[in-house]
Amino acid sequence: TQGVSSAASDVYKRQALQLIRRIARAAMRRLGLLLLALVRAQSDQAKWLENLEQLAVFVGERGHPDVPLDHPLGKWLASTRASIRRGTLDDGRVAEFRAAGGLVHPMEGRWDDAHVLLTEFVKREGHADVPPQHREKGVPLAAWLRRQKREALEGLMAPSRIKMLEELNR
């Protein structure tokens, strides 16, 4: 009977060893995937910081964040703005983006300029009904005005700006 129990013990040990090896291989695969994810996250963070720095330099040199699409930062900027509008970029990155001089809407930092263009349009045309695709001195005035109306309705606009726009509609 000792030979049988010794054989059973050997079988048990082999099965236990095989199980330990399977668990170890699975753990190593998971560890490899975690390390790969960590490397990718670090690379993504490094690229993000590099782009932020380039944006800050661009804004510092030119005084505005209107990066053309054909500029190396152009596609990143457009993608980042879209992520912010969709709400898929975390708050920390949004804050970093704004701190580097980034604006969600290209005309966001030029509200007064667009308002002057709208004022000129009203003086010239006698009304503030800007045609849908109208551009004033290259600025998409109709799109800007639609956005202002939407922001006013959503309660996102300062009362002083609402008043300025209402005065043009009289």
Image (cartoon, rainbow, N blue to C red):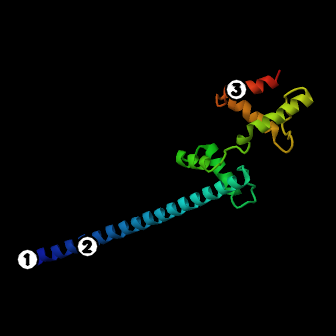
Indicate the secondary structure of the residue bearing disc 3: helix
Instruction: Name the residue: 54% across, 47% down.
Output: 90
Of the residues shown, which amino acid type is indicated by label 3? Ser
Foreground mark, 3 or 1?
3
Foreground mark, 2 or 1?
2
Instruction: Name the residue: 70% across, 41% down.
Output: 108
Residue 160: mark in rendering:
3
- The residue where tag 2 is placed is 17
Residue 2: mark in rendering:
1
Q: Estimate the spatial distance between the alpha carbons at disc 3 and disc 1, rounded to whole Å.
A: 95 Å
Indicate the secondary structure of the residue bearing disc 2: helix
Instruction: Name the residue: 68% across, 32% down.
Output: 151
Of the residues shown, which amino acid type is indicated by label 1? Gln
Q: Is residue 132 above or below residue 100?
A: above
Furthest-top residue in this view: 170
Of the residues shown, which amino acid type is indicated by label 2? Leu
Instruction: From the top left corner, tell me how far across and down residue 53 is, in percent.
Output: 61, 57
- Residue 4: quarter of image: bottom left
Instruction: From the top left corner, tell me how far across and down residue 148 is, in percent.
Output: 73, 33
Q: Nearer the viewer, residue 30 or 19?
A: 30
- Residue 47: quarter of image: bottom right
Instruction: Name the residue: 24% across, 70% down.
Output: 16
